[in-house]
Amino acid sequence: MPDEAPEFTPADAVAHLQRHGVVPQGASPTARSLGGGVSNHVYQVTWDDDCVVVKRPLPNLDVEDDWPADVDRVHNEAAAIRTYDAVLTGAAVNVRVPRVVSETDDHVVAIECAPEGATMWKRELLDGRVDAAVAEAVGEALGAVHDAAADDPDVREAFASKRPFDQLRIDPYHRATAERNPDVADAIHAEIDRIMDVSRTLVHGDYSPKNVLVDRSDGTVPWILDFEVAHWGDPAFDTAFMCNHLYIKSMHNQEQHAAYADAADRFWDAYDRAVDWDIEAETVGELAVLMLARADGKSPVEYVDAATADALRRVAKRTLRGDAATLAEFAALTREEAATL
């Protein structure tokens, strides 16, 4: 069972940083909530010319359904940030991750703030601003990390536990969705067995537009965030997770379907060039489950209406039943459904 955690307020975050010497004596820090989604207390603490983001995980996620998770996942996140930073720096990919500033035994991590003025890519996409260059950059970055980590036994050992992945993805997305959709439950359980059996590389586990900030102060530089679900597993989970969000938005904002579909293509092509394996079929299979999960799992997507949710279900179930085996075929199903909305 996950640990119990007391309330963690903005004042607590400031006191923590002062106690551990992150905020220097004599400084006058201020703290504000960054929302934290459903899984963490997250605060931005600023003083003088410096800034960090402080994260403390919740032992039970803030959703309608019961969703427990171990709070030590925050240390998993810190380790993944360091791994991503090393790979991306060495690969000279124009994508950044924030550095870890502080990590303590009471399950609190402080990380570098992204540049002031950086915007959440999800927000841009929902506003209809579809920058395919960002999709290509994060595809290249993901491929670089997957490819490099696959040959690193130290990374394999560090991220061997799939417990965060099971607690934060398989149980709330896959098992909950199978229970609510008995007509395709067998196919979903087969995908669970398949993906849990794969141990190929370091998987981010939450590779989505909400975890990409875009800094346009000097060109276009994406920043990748939120690594708490990182584990050694199936790279197709990450590719499917990102494509899922792009295709959902293509149906939510159906008038710009082609732009979102192009971004998904650019993401996939950049990823595919960076790795030496072919995981398109696995990506499509997982993509179907994830799309259905965003309608019927424990974390349904918040911005789609009932009609769009039904369209997501139809695309997902048709794919699970064999109507799409390639990303092009999956895109065609989304285009067909988007035209009905």
Image (cartoon, rainbow, N blue to C red):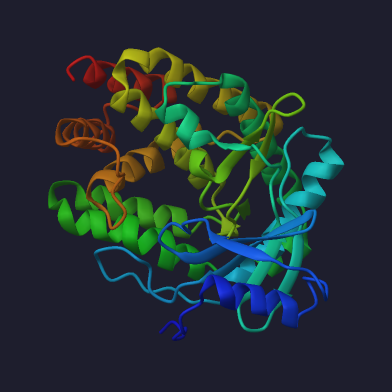
Quadrant in the picture for residue 103:
bottom right
Say above or below: 190 vs 76. Answer: above
102 sits left or right of 250 in the view: right
Say above or below: 63 vs 255. Answer: below
Residue 30 coordinates in the image, percent (x, y): 64, 64
The residue shown at (58%, 66%) is: 55
Quadrant in which the C terminus is drawn: top left
Quadrant in which the N terminus is drawn: bottom left
The residue shown at (16%, 55%) is: 180
Residue 156 coordinates in the image, percent (x, y): 69, 62
Say above or below: 102 vs 332. Answer: below
Say above or below: 263 vs 215. Answer: above
The residue shown at (23%, 52%) is: 186
Residue 273 coordinates in the image, percent (x, y): 68, 26
Quadrant in the picture for residue 261:
top left
Query: Is residue 49 at least partly visible in the picture?
Result: yes
Query: Is residue 73 at least partly visible in the picture?
Result: no
Residue 45 coordinates in the image, percent (x, y): 65, 62
166 sits left or right of 140 in the view: left
Which is more toward the observer, 216 or 185?
Answer: 216
26 sits left or right of 257 in the view: right
Which is more toward the observer, 193 or 37?
Answer: 37
Report the label total: 0
